[in-house]
Image (tube, grey):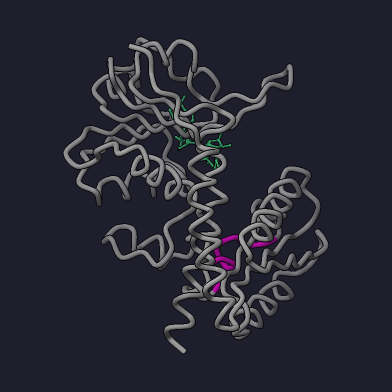
Amino acid sequence: MVAKIIDGVAIAKAVRVGIAARAQALAARGIQPSLTVIVVGENPASAVYVRNKVRACGEAGIHSDVVHFPGDATEDQILSRIRALNADQTVHGILVQLPLPQHISVRRLLETIAVDKDVDGFHLYNVGGLVIGQTVFPPCTPYGVQKILEHENIEIEGKNVTVVGASNIVGKPMALMLMQREATVAICHAKTRDLAQYTILADIVVVAAGKPGLIVAPMIRTGAVVIDVGINFLPNGKLVGDVDFEGVRQKASYITPVPGGVGPMTVTMLLENTVAAAERATKAA
Ligand code: NAP
């Protein structure tokens, strides 16, 4: 069996057409969906991510602002800006670009963002909502994986899913979202003994560990769906995921490449959450 390679760029493009149409419909009513990104300090990787978000917003008809604080800004300065953005009715989405400098409490900042503007889905209310299936905004990366599975008509209900990686932003929410769709989910992490014992049983494997070459063909059941969230730069500068792509694609039924798989969907779901925030704010007004 040779896997179908899932084209995340094409899926993202198709989803973004719908998002842009919704943004246009709002604009026709005099409401421009708007996202504010808060950046603290200078981080080259963050600068690239923020540039991508701003460009994607522009292409979808979403207004975006970047509020850039110096690396020595105080927590209170940032918190008061977040409170002002919460009160600003022209702002529909607020996100804090992570990582933050050591002296800033990530949780305090995230908990200050109004729940109905928390388009990254990292506020405790949204995280808790995942447990009972009532999230206001699903976090963007797992939401993107879910969209990919839906787009490819891959059934989730009743399937065995193994999520490799248990971070708060990818692995754990991914597992909860798939459980909500009635999959049987195993979550693995760095201390999992015999990872292959879990992956080999899975109909769907979602890998988000940040370890190149972690998942190889003998760990995968013939015909499984393999979604690779990992982003790793090898010493030679090559970008790879966590899955041995060439080996695993000979055995899986579907596989996402890196780059061009999950990555383009993460920003897409940020756009989706921002437009959804604007639509809800309009209905509530
Ligand atoms: P993270 O916070 O470092 O978490 C990594 C998780 O993987 C942890 O739960 C860790 O276990 C687990 N892990 C590490 N080594 C493992 C091993 N050998 N076997 C099993 N589990 C292992 O990373 P993250 O933020 O979730 O991101 C994960 C990867 O996805 C990274 O490569 C990141 O760049 C990428 N990513 C991609 C996108 C995208 O848009 N495509 C978005 C976000 C992240 P412990 O909990 O035990 O430490």
Task: Reply above or below: 158 against 18.
Answer: above
Residue 78 shown left or right of residue 1 in the figure: right
Task: Reply above or below: 61 against 193.
Answer: below
Question: Where does residue 22 sit, x and y in percent of width and height?
Answer: 50, 67
Residue 51 shown left or right of residue 130 in the figure: right
**Number of numbered discs visible in the structure rendering:** 0
When asked about the image quadrant of residue 232, the answer is top right
Question: Where does residue 277 sit, x and y in percent of width and height?
Answer: 49, 72
Magenta stretch, overall SS: helix
Question: Where does residue 162 sit, x and y in percent of width and height?
Answer: 31, 32
Q: Residue furthest bottom?
A: 285
Camera-side residue of 234 and 48: 48
Question: Where does residue 241 sit, x and y in percent of width and height?
Answer: 54, 26
Q: Is 107 contained in the magenta span?
A: yes
Q: Residue furthest left?
A: 158
Camera-side residue of 257 and 11: 11
Q: Residue at x 69, y 66 (%)?
A: 64
Residue 13 shown left or right of residue 216 in the figure: right
Q: Which span of residues is magenta-colored?
A: 104-113
Task: Reply above or below: 274 against 48.
Answer: below
Camera-side residue of 123 and 19: 19
> On the rendered image, what quadrant is the N terminus found in?
top left
Q: Residue at x 37, y 25 (%)?
A: 254
Q: Residue at x 36, y 35 (%)?
A: 163
Q: Residue at x 73, y 22 (%)?
A: 237
